[in-house]
Image: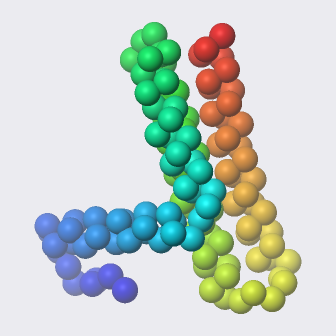
């Protein structure tokens, strides 16, 4: 658990350490996140090449970053639900389904963004 008494630069350093641990855990345990990182690595140079303006480039790259952000949050929800228990519960299933729906919406947003900009 985080040191609640840390202040100033120590708190910022701790936050960075915990964030890196979160990225590592997600990379290790979530195949979807690994796939989305690969999509990001492949799509970023394409976005820089195909985007005509800075705004277009930011929208193309940002839409893929949004997918990864939502996946991180979805993974956090799933981890908490699994921590509580693996037995089927309606609310646990609902929480996981809502997280999955959020990821799907971010994927749809990215697809629409890329389609409209590239057309």
Q: How many marks?
A: 0
Quadrant in the picture for the N terminus: bottom left
Q: Residue at x 39, y 17 (%)?
A: 54
Left or right: where 59 falls relative to 1: right
Residue 21 falls in which quadrant of the image? bottom left
Quadrant in the picture for the C terminus: top right
Q: Residue at x 28, y 83 (%)?
A: 4
Left or right: where 73 falls relative to 109: left
Q: Residue at x 71, y 43 (%)?
A: 105
Work out whether residue 96 or residue 6 is closer to the camera in this orientation and state it.
Answer: 96
Type of colouring:
rainbow
Residue 73 falls in which quadrant of the image? bottom right
> Residue 87 at x, y = what percent?
81, 89
Residue placed furthest toward the left = 9
Work out whether residue 44 or residue 52 is closer to the camera in this orientation and state it.
Answer: 44
Q: Is residue 75 above or below residue 112?
A: below
Q: Is residue 90 above or below residue 55?
A: below
> Residue 7 at x, y = what percent?
17, 74
> Residue 100 at x, y = what percent?
73, 57
Q: Is residue 48 above or below residue 31?
A: above
Q: Is residue 45 visible?
A: yes
Q: Is residue 55 visible?
A: no
Left or right: where 26 falls relative to 22: right
Left or right: where 30 falls relative to 26: right
Q: Is residue 90 above or below residue 42?
A: below
> Residue 26 at x, y = what percent?
51, 66
């Amino acid at each position: 658990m985080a040191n609640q008494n840390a202040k100033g630069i120590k708190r910022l350093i701790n936050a960075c350490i915990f964030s890196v641990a979160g990225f590592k855990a997600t990379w290790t345990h979530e195949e979807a996140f690994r796939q989305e990182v690969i999509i990001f690595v492949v799509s970023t140079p394409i976005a820089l090449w195909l985007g005509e303006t800075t705004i277009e480039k930011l929208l193309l790259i940002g839409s893929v970053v949004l997918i990864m952000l939502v996946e991180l949050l979805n993974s956090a929800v799933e981890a908490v639900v699994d921590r509580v228990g693996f037995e089927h519960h309606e609310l646990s299933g609902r929480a996981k389904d809502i997280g999955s729906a959020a990821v799907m919406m971010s994927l749809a947003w990215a697809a629409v963004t890329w389609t409209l900009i590239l057309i």
